[in-house]
Amino acid sequence: MNALQHLTRQQDLSAIWAAIDEQGGVIIDDFLDPALLQRLREDCLPAIAEHKPGAATGHDFWKDFHGSATKRITGLAQLSPAWGELLCDPIYKGMADQYLGENNYYLNTGQLICIGPGETPQLLHRDELNWPQAAQPDHEITITAIFALTDFTEENGATVIAPGSHRWPGALPEVRADQTCRAVMKAGSALLYSGKVIHGGGPNDSQDQWRVGLHAGFVSGWLRSEENHQLTTSLEAARLLPEHAQRMLGFRSFVPPKAARLGMVNYEDAGALL
Ligand SMILES: O=C(O)CCC(=O)C(=O)O
């Protein structure tokens, strides 16, 4: 059936991982408690008004991928203490531990994706194809959540996803419309999904609604993240974050058990800077 399961935070973690394993994604209703949702909105939404839609740099392909009526805002750790708190959420962290291995990953990007009226459907894709040489059928290198900061509806751009496509062979196979569904969810809910599942931002056919998602995934620690967190997070802002959030943003070095340390400062752990 082309619909994602809806679960809640009260479910056993094993049920959440089972749903991701089976369908490639799951919706957790009311993931954020109302007070945290409100703080995230207060911290982040004012930045949207100042931001222009569309991409100013890059090839036409990437301008199209970005979306000409879509605003993308990064560097959220500088804007939002609530985001630092969400980074430490036990289910969100648990998802990354489960799929990428404990302490084996960093934040890939934590960005507001604000899909505006008139936006067309985004190219369907698998996130792991950001790192095509590293993507392997038998393990994940990236795992993501999109937290709905506004309601996600069919009309305003809810994410399009093809349940089960994380197991389809081929880099980017054809996807028929009847193989997809929309991640319709209330503000405060979250879509958790595999780096292998085929998905994309939905079209926004509304006259006046902005669909705002906090799109925030993790990537294996030995791969380069999409977002350059350390250029948008000052040392002062980083010092105020919880230790795990500092680590996720690269203010700790990567210390894999059987390889060299990466991301060092003066050949010491980057945490010494803080
Ligand atoms: O905004 C969405 O719903 C999905 C966006 C996405 O998949 C992306 O930009 O990589």
Image (cartoon, rainbow, N blue to C red):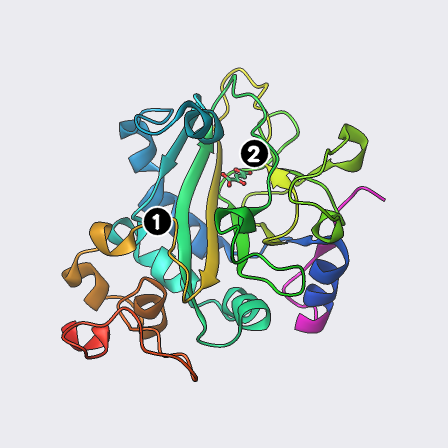
Query: Image height check: is 74 above or below 207?
Result: below
Q: Secondary structure at mark 2?
A: loop
- Between label 1 and label 2, give the one nearer the viewer: 1
x and y percent of residue 232 in the render? 23, 50
Q: Inspect this view and state whether residue 180 appears.
A: yes
Q: Which residue is mark 1?
A: 227
- Amino acid under disc 1: Glu
Identify the mark nearer the N-term, 1 or 2. 2
Q: Determine whether the beta carbon of the residue marked 2 sits less than 8 angstroms from the nearest atom of ligand 1.
A: yes
Start-end of magenta stretch:
1-14
* Label 1, label 2: how far apart the Cα atoms are: 18 Å
Residue drawn 43% across the image and 83% down it: 258
Q: Quadrant of residue 224?
A: bottom left
Residue drawn 39% across the image and 49% down it: 226
- Hey, which residue is sitting farthest bottom in the picture? 257
Front-most of residues 99 and 74: 99
Q: Which residue is mark 2?
A: 201
Query: Image height check: is 184 above or below 51?
Result: below
Residue drawn 41% across the image and 60% down it: 223
Residue drawn 57% across the image and 37% down it: 151
